[in-house]
Image (cartoon, rainbow, N blue to C red):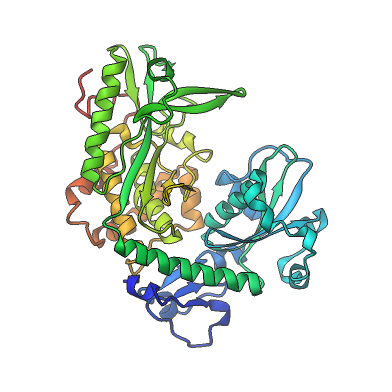
Amino acid sequence: MMTAEVLNMIIREQRYLKEGELLQRGDVLIQSEKQLTKQQAEMAGVWYMNAGAPRLAKCSREQLQVYWKDCGLIGNRTLSHNRFFRVTIFHFQLVQLIRLTDKDALTTRYQETDSFRTTVKAEHNYTERVSNDKLLQQVVKAAIASLYVLALEVGEVIVQLSGDGLVQPVSASDRIVDDHSYQLAKQQFAETMALNIVNHKQMLSIMLGADPEVAIVNATGQLVSASYFFGENKGAAIGTDSIRVKGKLIYPLLELRPRPTSEPAQLLMQIQRLLMQASERINNSSMRLVAGAMPIKGIALGGHIHLSGVPLTSRLLRLLDSLITIPLALIEAESGKERRPRYGRLGDYRRQAYGGFEYRTLPSWLISPMVAKAVFALTKMCAEDALQLDTVPQLSMDMMRAYYQADYAQLRSFWPQIKQTIFRMTRYKEYESYIDPLITAIDQQKRWDERLDIRKKWRIPV
Protein backbone atom coordinates (compact mmCIF):
# COMPACT_ATOMS: atom_id res chain seq x y z
CA MET A 1 0.00 0.00 0.00
CA MET A 2 1.30 3.42 -0.98
CA THR A 3 -0.77 6.02 0.85
CA ALA A 4 1.37 6.72 3.92
CA GLU A 5 4.54 6.89 1.88
CA VAL A 6 3.11 9.31 -0.70
CA LEU A 7 3.44 12.11 1.87
CA ASN A 8 7.22 11.61 1.66
CA MET A 9 7.22 10.90 -2.06
CA ILE A 10 10.57 10.34 -3.74
CA ILE A 11 10.47 10.67 -7.51
CA ARG A 12 13.18 8.55 -9.07
CA GLU A 13 14.17 8.37 -12.71
CA GLN A 14 15.44 5.17 -14.23
CA ARG A 15 17.98 7.07 -16.30
CA TYR A 16 19.72 8.08 -13.05
CA LEU A 17 19.42 4.77 -11.17
CA LYS A 18 22.71 3.18 -10.28
CA GLU A 19 23.30 -0.45 -11.16
CA GLY A 20 21.68 -2.63 -8.52
CA GLU A 21 19.97 0.32 -6.83
CA LEU A 22 16.76 -0.83 -5.15
CA LEU A 23 13.45 0.98 -5.03
CA GLN A 24 11.49 1.68 -1.87
CA ARG A 25 7.78 1.30 -1.17
CA GLY A 26 6.12 4.64 -1.94
CA ASP A 27 8.63 5.66 -4.63
CA VAL A 28 7.51 7.03 -7.97
CA LEU A 29 9.70 5.65 -10.75
CA ILE A 30 9.80 7.33 -14.16
CA GLN A 31 10.90 4.56 -16.47
CA SER A 32 13.11 4.92 -19.53
CA GLU A 33 13.55 2.80 -22.65
CA LYS A 34 15.89 0.46 -20.77
CA GLN A 35 14.23 -2.61 -19.28
CA LEU A 36 14.04 -2.73 -15.48
CA THR A 37 15.61 -5.61 -13.62
CA LYS A 38 13.13 -8.21 -12.35
CA GLN A 39 13.60 -6.99 -8.79
CA GLN A 40 13.05 -3.37 -9.76
CA ALA A 41 10.01 -4.16 -11.90
CA GLU A 42 8.23 -6.17 -9.21
CA MET A 43 8.67 -3.92 -6.17
CA ALA A 44 5.32 -3.72 -4.37
CA GLY A 45 4.02 -0.24 -3.60
CA VAL A 46 6.00 1.57 -6.31
CA TRP A 47 4.14 3.89 -8.66
CA TYR A 48 5.58 3.09 -12.08
CA MET A 49 5.27 5.93 -14.59
CA ASN A 50 6.12 5.72 -18.29
CA ALA A 51 5.64 1.97 -18.51
CA GLY A 52 5.40 2.38 -22.28
CA ALA A 53 8.86 3.87 -22.72
CA PRO A 54 10.59 0.61 -23.81
CA ARG A 55 7.92 0.00 -26.45
CA LEU A 56 8.05 3.60 -27.67
CA ALA A 57 11.79 3.29 -28.25
CA LYS A 58 11.09 0.59 -30.85
CA CYS A 59 8.43 2.60 -32.72
CA SER A 60 9.16 4.68 -35.79
CA ARG A 61 7.32 7.94 -36.36
CA GLU A 62 5.27 6.20 -39.05
CA GLN A 63 4.25 3.42 -36.64
CA LEU A 64 3.24 6.02 -34.07
CA GLN A 65 1.08 7.78 -36.66
CA VAL A 66 -0.75 4.54 -37.49
CA TYR A 67 -1.27 3.76 -33.80
CA TRP A 68 -2.56 7.24 -33.00
CA LYS A 69 -4.94 6.97 -35.92
CA ASP A 70 -6.26 3.68 -34.53
CA CYS A 71 -6.83 5.50 -31.23
CA GLY A 72 -8.72 8.37 -32.86
CA LEU A 73 -6.06 11.01 -32.29
CA ILE A 74 -5.33 11.44 -35.99
CA GLY A 75 -8.17 11.87 -38.46
CA ASN A 76 -8.44 11.18 -42.18
CA ARG A 77 -8.05 14.79 -43.24
CA THR A 78 -4.74 16.25 -44.33
CA LEU A 79 -4.17 19.35 -42.21
CA SER A 80 -3.03 22.57 -43.85
CA HIS A 81 -1.69 25.97 -42.82
CA ASN A 82 -0.13 24.27 -39.83
CA ARG A 83 1.70 25.58 -36.83
CA PHE A 84 3.83 23.16 -34.82
CA PHE A 85 4.40 23.04 -31.08
CA ARG A 86 6.61 21.00 -28.78
CA VAL A 87 4.56 20.24 -25.68
CA THR A 88 6.26 18.97 -22.53
CA ILE A 89 3.98 17.23 -20.03
CA PHE A 90 4.49 15.96 -16.50
CA HIS A 91 1.50 13.93 -15.27
CA PHE A 92 -1.32 15.91 -16.95
CA GLN A 93 0.39 19.24 -16.26
CA LEU A 94 1.97 21.47 -18.88
CA VAL A 95 5.68 22.06 -18.32
CA GLN A 96 6.50 23.96 -21.49
CA LEU A 97 4.89 24.88 -24.82
CA ILE A 98 7.29 25.91 -27.58
CA ARG A 99 6.42 27.09 -31.09
CA LEU A 100 8.58 25.33 -33.68
CA THR A 101 9.44 26.01 -37.27
CA ASP A 102 8.26 23.45 -39.81
CA LYS A 103 11.84 22.25 -40.25
CA ASP A 104 12.36 21.71 -36.52
CA ALA A 105 9.06 19.87 -36.18
CA LEU A 106 9.41 17.53 -39.13
CA THR A 107 13.12 16.81 -39.54
CA THR A 108 14.93 17.02 -36.18
CA ARG A 109 15.48 13.92 -34.10
CA TYR A 110 15.09 14.15 -30.32
CA GLN A 111 18.48 12.77 -29.43
CA GLU A 112 20.13 15.40 -31.63
CA THR A 113 18.29 18.45 -30.36
CA ASP A 114 19.11 18.85 -26.67
CA SER A 115 21.08 22.03 -27.35
CA PHE A 116 18.25 23.43 -29.45
CA ARG A 117 15.68 22.63 -26.79
CA THR A 118 17.56 24.41 -24.03
CA THR A 119 18.15 27.61 -26.01
CA VAL A 120 14.62 28.51 -27.01
CA LYS A 121 14.04 32.12 -27.92
CA ALA A 122 11.61 33.90 -25.61
CA GLU A 123 9.21 34.75 -28.44
CA HIS A 124 8.86 31.04 -29.22
CA ASN A 125 7.82 30.13 -25.67
CA TYR A 126 4.02 30.03 -25.58
CA THR A 127 3.69 28.47 -22.11
CA GLU A 128 2.26 31.58 -20.47
CA ARG A 129 -0.30 32.09 -23.25
CA VAL A 130 -2.17 28.82 -22.74
CA SER A 131 -4.57 29.96 -20.01
CA ASN A 132 -6.09 32.58 -22.33
CA ASP A 133 -6.02 30.71 -25.62
CA LYS A 134 -8.53 27.91 -26.30
CA LEU A 135 -6.65 26.66 -29.35
CA LEU A 136 -3.45 26.28 -27.37
CA GLN A 137 -5.45 24.48 -24.68
CA GLN A 138 -6.52 21.98 -27.36
CA VAL A 139 -2.86 21.54 -28.32
CA VAL A 140 -1.98 20.70 -24.71
CA LYS A 141 -4.98 18.37 -24.40
CA ALA A 142 -3.91 16.51 -27.55
CA ALA A 143 -0.39 16.10 -26.16
CA ILE A 144 -1.67 14.64 -22.88
CA ALA A 145 -3.96 12.22 -24.72
CA SER A 146 -1.17 11.21 -27.11
CA LEU A 147 1.15 10.34 -24.24
CA TYR A 148 -1.59 8.54 -22.28
CA VAL A 149 -2.26 5.99 -25.04
CA LEU A 150 1.50 5.35 -25.18
CA ALA A 151 1.42 4.50 -21.46
CA LEU A 152 3.44 7.62 -20.71
CA GLU A 153 2.86 10.20 -18.00
CA VAL A 154 6.00 12.21 -18.69
CA GLY A 155 7.16 13.19 -22.15
CA GLU A 156 7.18 15.54 -25.09
CA VAL A 157 4.88 15.58 -28.10
CA ILE A 158 5.14 17.52 -31.34
CA VAL A 159 1.57 18.67 -32.07
CA GLN A 160 0.39 20.36 -35.23
CA LEU A 161 -2.40 22.94 -35.19
CA SER A 162 -4.12 23.53 -38.52
CA GLY A 163 -5.43 26.81 -39.82
CA ASP A 164 -9.00 25.74 -39.09
CA GLY A 165 -8.26 24.72 -35.50
CA LEU A 166 -7.72 20.95 -35.79
CA VAL A 167 -4.94 19.35 -33.76
CA GLN A 168 -3.09 16.07 -34.05
CA PRO A 169 0.21 14.59 -32.82
CA VAL A 170 3.23 14.25 -35.08
CA SER A 171 5.79 12.49 -32.87
CA ALA A 172 6.56 11.79 -29.21
CA SER A 173 9.46 11.09 -26.90
CA ASP A 174 9.92 10.17 -23.25
CA ARG A 175 13.24 12.02 -23.24
CA ILE A 176 13.02 15.37 -21.47
CA VAL A 177 15.78 17.85 -20.81
CA ASP A 178 16.36 17.90 -17.06
CA ASP A 179 16.17 21.69 -16.74
CA HIS A 180 14.68 24.08 -14.20
CA SER A 181 11.15 23.84 -15.63
CA TYR A 182 11.23 20.06 -15.42
CA GLN A 183 12.55 20.04 -11.85
CA LEU A 184 9.88 22.55 -10.84
CA ALA A 185 7.19 20.34 -12.39
CA LYS A 186 8.43 17.33 -10.41
CA GLN A 187 8.43 19.35 -7.19
CA GLN A 188 4.94 20.70 -7.83
CA PHE A 189 3.65 17.22 -8.56
CA ALA A 190 5.05 15.84 -5.28
CA GLU A 191 3.64 18.76 -3.28
CA THR A 192 0.23 18.57 -4.96
CA MET A 193 0.00 14.82 -4.37
CA ALA A 194 0.89 15.24 -0.69
CA LEU A 195 -1.74 17.98 -0.30
CA ASN A 196 -4.36 15.91 -2.10
CA ILE A 197 -3.71 12.92 0.13
CA VAL A 198 -4.04 15.05 3.27
CA ASN A 199 -7.27 16.60 2.00
CA HIS A 200 -8.60 13.18 1.02
CA LYS A 201 -7.92 11.79 4.50
CA GLN A 202 -9.75 14.74 6.10
CA MET A 203 -12.87 14.45 3.93
CA LEU A 204 -15.76 12.28 5.04
CA SER A 205 -16.02 10.40 1.78
CA ILE A 206 -15.42 10.30 -1.93
CA MET A 207 -18.42 11.71 -3.78
CA LEU A 208 -19.91 10.11 -6.90
CA GLY A 209 -22.00 11.86 -9.52
CA ALA A 210 -23.11 11.14 -13.07
CA ASP A 211 -24.82 12.47 -16.19
CA PRO A 212 -25.79 9.43 -18.31
CA GLU A 213 -27.60 9.84 -21.63
CA VAL A 214 -30.72 8.13 -22.96
CA ALA A 215 -32.21 8.21 -26.44
CA ILE A 216 -35.95 8.29 -27.11
CA VAL A 217 -37.09 6.37 -30.21
CA ASN A 218 -40.50 5.99 -31.80
CA ALA A 219 -42.23 2.85 -33.06
CA THR A 220 -40.26 2.92 -36.33
CA GLY A 221 -36.93 3.23 -34.54
CA GLN A 222 -36.38 6.90 -35.35
CA LEU A 223 -34.82 9.27 -32.82
CA VAL A 224 -37.29 11.58 -31.11
CA SER A 225 -35.70 14.77 -29.80
CA ALA A 226 -35.75 14.88 -26.01
CA SER A 227 -36.14 18.67 -26.18
CA TYR A 228 -39.71 18.07 -27.42
CA PHE A 229 -40.58 16.80 -23.93
CA PHE A 230 -37.99 18.52 -21.72
CA GLY A 231 -36.79 21.66 -23.49
CA GLU A 232 -33.10 22.46 -22.99
CA ASN A 233 -33.17 22.30 -19.15
CA LYS A 234 -29.40 22.71 -18.89
CA GLY A 235 -29.29 22.71 -15.10
CA ALA A 236 -32.25 20.46 -14.28
CA ALA A 237 -32.02 16.95 -12.82
CA ILE A 238 -33.81 15.73 -15.95
CA GLY A 239 -32.61 17.64 -18.99
CA THR A 240 -31.19 17.33 -22.46
CA ASP A 241 -27.73 17.16 -23.95
CA SER A 242 -26.70 18.99 -27.07
CA ILE A 243 -24.98 17.97 -30.27
CA ARG A 244 -24.02 20.14 -33.23
CA VAL A 245 -25.46 19.14 -36.60
CA LYS A 246 -24.43 21.19 -39.66
CA GLY A 247 -23.47 24.09 -37.42
CA LYS A 248 -26.76 24.08 -35.53
CA LEU A 249 -27.03 23.19 -31.85
CA ILE A 250 -29.82 20.72 -31.12
CA TYR A 251 -30.83 18.87 -27.95
CA PRO A 252 -31.88 15.35 -28.96
CA LEU A 253 -30.70 13.27 -26.00
CA LEU A 254 -32.22 12.88 -22.56
CA GLU A 255 -29.70 13.38 -19.76
CA LEU A 256 -30.12 12.45 -16.09
CA ARG A 257 -28.23 14.43 -13.45
CA PRO A 258 -28.54 12.91 -9.97
CA ARG A 259 -27.16 14.74 -6.96
CA PRO A 260 -23.64 13.69 -5.89
CA THR A 261 -23.58 11.11 -3.13
CA SER A 262 -21.01 9.00 -1.34
CA GLU A 263 -22.82 5.69 -1.75
CA PRO A 264 -23.42 3.66 -4.94
CA ALA A 265 -26.80 2.48 -3.59
CA GLN A 266 -28.02 6.06 -3.19
CA LEU A 267 -26.88 6.96 -6.70
CA LEU A 268 -28.74 3.95 -8.07
CA MET A 269 -31.96 4.96 -6.28
CA GLN A 270 -31.73 8.48 -7.65
CA ILE A 271 -31.21 7.21 -11.20
CA GLN A 272 -34.25 4.95 -10.97
CA ARG A 273 -36.39 7.80 -9.61
CA LEU A 274 -35.28 10.17 -12.36
CA LEU A 275 -35.99 7.53 -15.02
CA MET A 276 -39.45 7.07 -13.54
CA GLN A 277 -40.12 10.82 -13.66
CA ALA A 278 -38.83 11.09 -17.21
CA SER A 279 -41.03 8.20 -18.33
CA GLU A 280 -44.09 9.80 -16.74
CA ARG A 281 -43.44 13.07 -18.55
CA ILE A 282 -43.00 11.34 -21.93
CA ASN A 283 -46.23 9.37 -21.28
CA ASN A 284 -46.30 7.61 -24.65
CA SER A 285 -46.33 3.82 -24.79
CA SER A 286 -45.20 3.78 -28.43
CA MET A 287 -41.87 5.35 -27.46
CA ARG A 288 -38.85 3.41 -26.23
CA LEU A 289 -36.00 4.58 -24.00
CA VAL A 290 -32.72 3.04 -25.17
CA ALA A 291 -29.17 3.21 -23.84
CA GLY A 292 -25.78 1.54 -24.27
CA ALA A 293 -23.06 2.66 -26.68
CA MET A 294 -24.82 3.32 -29.99
CA PRO A 295 -28.44 2.13 -29.98
CA ILE A 296 -29.18 4.25 -33.06
CA LYS A 297 -26.71 4.34 -35.94
CA GLY A 298 -24.60 7.47 -35.71
CA ILE A 299 -25.85 8.45 -32.23
CA ALA A 300 -23.21 7.69 -29.58
CA LEU A 301 -24.34 7.71 -25.94
CA GLY A 302 -22.18 8.40 -22.92
CA GLY A 303 -22.32 7.53 -19.24
CA HIS A 304 -20.01 10.08 -17.64
CA ILE A 305 -19.04 9.56 -14.01
CA HIS A 306 -18.09 12.46 -11.70
CA LEU A 307 -15.62 12.08 -8.83
CA SER A 308 -14.59 14.50 -6.08
CA GLY A 309 -12.63 14.09 -2.88
CA VAL A 310 -9.97 12.07 -4.66
CA PRO A 311 -6.90 13.24 -6.60
CA LEU A 312 -6.86 12.85 -10.36
CA THR A 313 -3.95 10.52 -11.11
CA SER A 314 -2.86 8.33 -13.97
CA ARG A 315 -3.17 5.35 -11.60
CA LEU A 316 -6.86 6.13 -11.07
CA LEU A 317 -7.59 6.67 -14.76
CA ARG A 318 -5.82 3.43 -15.70
CA LEU A 319 -7.81 1.58 -13.04
CA LEU A 320 -11.07 3.00 -14.40
CA ASP A 321 -10.03 2.02 -17.93
CA SER A 322 -9.00 -1.50 -16.94
CA LEU A 323 -11.66 -2.37 -14.38
CA ILE A 324 -14.71 -0.68 -15.89
CA THR A 325 -14.26 0.34 -19.53
CA ILE A 326 -12.72 -2.94 -20.73
CA PRO A 327 -15.31 -5.11 -18.91
CA LEU A 328 -18.15 -3.06 -20.44
CA ALA A 329 -16.56 -3.46 -23.87
CA LEU A 330 -16.71 -7.23 -23.34
CA ILE A 331 -20.50 -7.20 -22.91
CA GLU A 332 -21.45 -4.35 -25.24
CA ALA A 333 -23.56 -4.91 -28.35
CA GLU A 334 -21.66 -5.32 -31.61
CA SER A 335 -22.74 -1.81 -32.59
CA GLY A 336 -20.73 -0.47 -29.65
CA LYS A 337 -17.51 -0.63 -31.64
CA GLU A 338 -18.89 2.10 -33.92
CA ARG A 339 -18.73 4.54 -31.00
CA ARG A 340 -14.96 4.30 -30.99
CA PRO A 341 -12.54 5.93 -31.53
CA ARG A 342 -14.40 9.25 -31.87
CA TYR A 343 -15.99 8.63 -28.48
CA GLY A 344 -15.01 6.34 -25.64
CA ARG A 345 -11.36 7.41 -25.61
CA LEU A 346 -9.42 5.66 -22.85
CA GLY A 347 -8.42 7.95 -20.00
CA ASP A 348 -10.75 10.72 -21.17
CA TYR A 349 -11.32 13.17 -18.35
CA ARG A 350 -12.39 16.77 -17.76
CA ARG A 351 -11.56 18.76 -14.66
CA GLN A 352 -14.57 20.40 -13.04
CA ALA A 353 -14.98 23.75 -11.26
CA TYR A 354 -16.04 22.00 -8.04
CA GLY A 355 -12.54 20.57 -7.70
CA GLY A 356 -13.25 17.07 -8.94
CA PHE A 357 -13.21 15.59 -12.41
CA GLU A 358 -15.42 13.77 -14.89
CA TYR A 359 -14.47 10.39 -16.37
CA ARG A 360 -15.91 10.57 -19.88
CA THR A 361 -14.97 7.24 -21.47
CA LEU A 362 -17.95 5.01 -20.65
CA PRO A 363 -21.02 4.30 -22.78
CA SER A 364 -24.45 4.76 -21.22
CA TRP A 365 -24.55 2.15 -18.47
CA LEU A 366 -28.28 2.86 -18.10
CA ILE A 367 -28.66 -0.20 -20.33
CA SER A 368 -29.56 -2.10 -17.13
CA PRO A 369 -29.41 -1.69 -13.33
CA MET A 370 -26.99 -4.65 -13.24
CA VAL A 371 -24.46 -2.71 -15.30
CA ALA A 372 -25.11 0.56 -13.46
CA LYS A 373 -24.60 -1.02 -10.04
CA ALA A 374 -21.30 -2.55 -11.07
CA VAL A 375 -20.10 0.75 -12.57
CA PHE A 376 -20.93 2.69 -9.39
CA ALA A 377 -19.32 0.15 -7.05
CA LEU A 378 -16.19 -0.28 -9.18
CA THR A 379 -15.80 3.49 -9.53
CA LYS A 380 -15.94 3.93 -5.77
CA MET A 381 -13.47 1.08 -5.23
CA CYS A 382 -11.04 2.41 -7.86
CA ALA A 383 -11.13 5.89 -6.31
CA GLU A 384 -10.45 4.52 -2.83
CA ASP A 385 -7.72 2.10 -3.86
CA ALA A 386 -5.89 4.00 -6.62
CA LEU A 387 -3.02 4.95 -4.31
CA GLN A 388 -3.24 1.83 -2.15
CA LEU A 389 -2.96 -1.06 -4.57
CA ASP A 390 0.54 -2.46 -4.80
CA THR A 391 0.16 -2.80 -8.57
CA VAL A 392 -2.24 -1.38 -11.15
CA PRO A 393 -3.09 -3.26 -14.37
CA GLN A 394 -1.38 -1.62 -17.34
CA LEU A 395 -3.12 -1.65 -20.69
CA SER A 396 -0.38 -2.21 -23.24
CA MET A 397 -0.42 -0.47 -26.60
CA ASP A 398 -1.61 -3.75 -28.15
CA MET A 399 -4.47 -3.99 -25.64
CA MET A 400 -5.48 -0.36 -26.21
CA ARG A 401 -5.52 -0.95 -29.96
CA ALA A 402 -7.66 -4.05 -29.36
CA TYR A 403 -10.15 -1.89 -27.46
CA TYR A 404 -10.41 0.67 -30.25
CA GLN A 405 -10.65 -1.98 -32.95
CA ALA A 406 -13.12 -4.12 -30.95
CA ASP A 407 -10.81 -7.14 -30.97
CA TYR A 408 -12.79 -8.97 -28.31
CA ALA A 409 -10.59 -12.07 -28.32
CA GLN A 410 -7.55 -9.95 -27.44
CA LEU A 411 -9.50 -8.03 -24.77
CA ARG A 412 -10.73 -11.27 -23.25
CA SER A 413 -7.14 -12.41 -22.72
CA PHE A 414 -6.79 -9.48 -20.28
CA TRP A 415 -9.97 -10.42 -18.37
CA PRO A 416 -8.37 -12.86 -15.84
CA GLN A 417 -5.96 -10.14 -14.70
CA ILE A 418 -8.84 -7.67 -14.36
CA LYS A 419 -10.81 -10.12 -12.23
CA GLN A 420 -7.89 -10.81 -9.93
CA THR A 421 -7.39 -7.09 -9.39
CA ILE A 422 -11.08 -6.65 -8.52
CA PHE A 423 -10.99 -9.56 -6.07
CA ARG A 424 -8.09 -8.11 -4.11
CA MET A 425 -9.52 -4.61 -3.75
CA THR A 426 -10.22 -3.35 -0.24
CA ARG A 427 -14.02 -3.26 -0.37
CA TYR A 428 -14.74 -6.00 -2.88
CA LYS A 429 -16.57 -8.14 -0.32
CA GLU A 430 -18.77 -5.20 0.63
CA TYR A 431 -19.80 -4.59 -2.99
CA GLU A 432 -19.66 -8.21 -4.13
CA SER A 433 -23.39 -8.39 -4.82
CA TYR A 434 -23.11 -5.32 -7.06
CA ILE A 435 -20.13 -6.58 -9.06
CA ASP A 436 -20.48 -10.35 -9.37
CA PRO A 437 -23.48 -10.30 -11.77
CA LEU A 438 -21.34 -8.32 -14.24
CA ILE A 439 -18.44 -10.75 -13.77
CA THR A 440 -20.78 -13.69 -14.41
CA ALA A 441 -22.20 -12.05 -17.53
CA ILE A 442 -18.68 -11.55 -18.93
CA ASP A 443 -17.62 -15.09 -18.01
CA GLN A 444 -20.67 -16.38 -19.89
CA GLN A 445 -19.86 -14.11 -22.84
CA LYS A 446 -23.24 -12.43 -22.76
CA ARG A 447 -23.98 -9.21 -24.69
CA TRP A 448 -26.44 -6.47 -23.89
CA ASP A 449 -29.25 -5.68 -26.34
CA GLU A 450 -29.50 -1.98 -27.18
CA ARG A 451 -32.81 -2.40 -29.00
CA LEU A 452 -34.75 -3.06 -25.79
CA ASP A 453 -36.61 -0.45 -23.76
CA ILE A 454 -34.47 -0.01 -20.64
CA ARG A 455 -37.54 0.67 -18.49
CA LYS A 456 -38.37 -3.03 -18.31
CA LYS A 457 -35.13 -3.92 -16.55
CA TRP A 458 -35.40 -0.83 -14.32
CA ARG A 459 -38.94 -1.98 -13.37
CA ILE A 460 -40.55 1.20 -14.60
CA PRO A 461 -44.09 0.94 -16.00
CA VAL A 462 -44.39 1.75 -19.70
List x then y, in percent, for residue 133: 66, 46
Give the image quarter of residue 101.
bottom right
Give the image quarter of residue 457.
top left
Residue placed most toward the observer, 364 or 197:
197
Does any portion of residue 448 appear in the rendered image? no
Asked if residue 56 is positioned above or below residue 439 in the image, the reply reads below
At a point 24% along the width and 38% down the height, the residue shown is 268
Question: Quarter holding the N terminus?
Answer: bottom left
List x then y, in percent, for residue 248: 58, 22
Residue placed most toward the observer, 305 or 341:
305
Does any portion of residue 382 appear in the rendered image? yes
Residue placed most toward the observer, 455 or 39:
455
At a point 76% along the width and 45% down the height, the residue shown is 82
Q: Is residue 99 left or right of residue 274?
A: right
Asked if residue 339 is positioned above or below residue 194 in the image, the reply reads above
Q: Is residue 110 left or right of residue 274?
A: right
List x then y, in percent, for residue 38: 43, 78
Asked if residue 447 is positioned above or below residue 206 in the image, the reply reads above
Question: Quarter holding the C terminus?
Answer: top left
Residue placed most toward the observer, 247 or 133:
133
**Count of labels in the image:** 0
List x then y, in percent, for residue 117: 74, 68
Q: Is residue 269 left or right of residue 175?
A: left
